[in-house]
């Protein structure tokens, strides 16, 4: 059975209390979760994550890094720093970074390469704005964003990334793409990835993912997991979401 990948993106939220509560809840849930869980956390919580998750089933990582490994970049953190703390993943190219910090496709590609140099798994986000979807440019946009990252990657490195499709219009808005809409985009992204490597990396869906819609999303053939925002900040909701994801994976395997 293929484990779905569930990535929590806390953004600039959370607390030490929430992290402790979430870890206790997963410990109570037991080892038979049937899903791979990664928490991407604000940097101040890295030390606590290392202490709480060092020997557990849950992995953790960052939400952003600089494309250089070190240097005079006040306020930034690097991929080697995350790796040294025990982190395993980092989000790059989230739409909030692309829009609020004017990160270009080339910057996102450089950040993905920095992660790979440090043996950190980059979670590469792609997604279209509402006006781009209305103009039928969804595929054009997401392929352009992904191609910028994968063009110069050797197949062995490409297989180490994770791709997350997040339609910008569905992030934090309460709107959500239907499972069929997600499947259409994921299928195209996997075909593009398949031209570059034999083993396609996981492709996640993000955008108002909740416990009550995760199973329907994961029932789609090309949805390998989800990137979860607000629902990951409510312990009971997130644990339930992960449990539902695991159950759906078992159903997919049996089917």
Image (cartoon, rainbow, N blue to C red):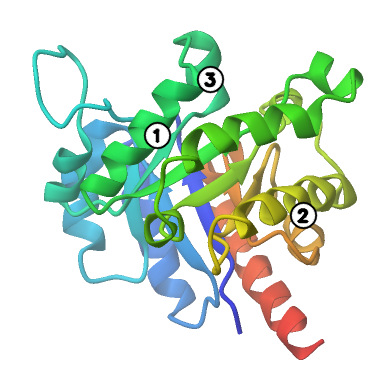
Binning the other alpha carbons within 10 Å of mark 1 as few (below 14), some (14 to 19) or many (20 upward) gives some
Residue at label 1? 14
Q: Is residue 11 above or below residue 98?
A: below
* Pointer 2 residue: 187
Residue plotted at (61% across, 85% down): 1
Q: Earlier in the sequence, mark 3 or mark 2?
A: 3
- Above or below — where is 147 with respect to 67? below
Residue 238, above or below 139: below
Residue 174 seen anywhere in this rendered image of the structure: no
* Left or right: residue 55 compared with residue 72: right
Residue 65 x, y percent position in the rendering: 29, 30
Q: Secondary structure at mark 1?
A: loop
Of 22 and 170, the residue lying toward us = 170
Position of the C terminus, as image quadrant, is bottom right
Q: Earlier in the sequence, mark 2 or mark 1?
A: 1
Select label 3 or label 1 by which is in front: 3
Residue topped by disc 3:
96
Estimate the x, y position of residue 254 in percent, counting from the top left. Answer: 76, 90
């Amino acid at each position: 059975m293929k484990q779905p990948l569930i990535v929590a993106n806390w953004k600039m939220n959370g607390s030490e209390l929430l992290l402790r509560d979430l870890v206790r809840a997963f410990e109570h849930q037991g080892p038979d979760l049937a899903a791979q869980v990664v928490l991407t956390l604000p940097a101040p919580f890295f030390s606590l994550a290392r202490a709480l998750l060092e020997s557990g089933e849950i992995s953790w990582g960052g939400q952003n890094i600089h494309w250089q490994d070190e240097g005079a970049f006040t306020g930034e953190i690097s991929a080697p720093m995350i790796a040294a703390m025990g982190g395993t993943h980092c989000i790059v190219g989230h739409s909030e970074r692309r829009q609020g910090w004017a990160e270009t496709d080339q910057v996102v590609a450089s950040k993905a390469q920095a992660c790979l140099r440090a043996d950190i798994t980059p979670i590469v986000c792609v997604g279209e704005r509402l006006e781009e979807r209305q103009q039928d440019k969804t595929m054009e946009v997401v392929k352009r964003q992904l191609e910028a990252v994968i063009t110069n990657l050797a197949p062995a490195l490409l297989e180490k990334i994770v791709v997350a499709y997040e339609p910008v219009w569905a992030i934090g808005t309460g709107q959500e793409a239907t499972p069929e809409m997600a499947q259409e985009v994921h299928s195209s992204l996997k075909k593009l990835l398949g031209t570059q490597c034999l083993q396609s990396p996981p492709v996640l869906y993000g955008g108002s993912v909740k416990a009550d819609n995760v199973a329907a999303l994961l029932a789609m053939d090309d949805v390998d997991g989800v990137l979860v925002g607000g629902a990951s900040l409510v312990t009971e909701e997130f644990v339930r979401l992960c449990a539902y994801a695991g159950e759906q994976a078992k159903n997919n395997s049996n089917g």
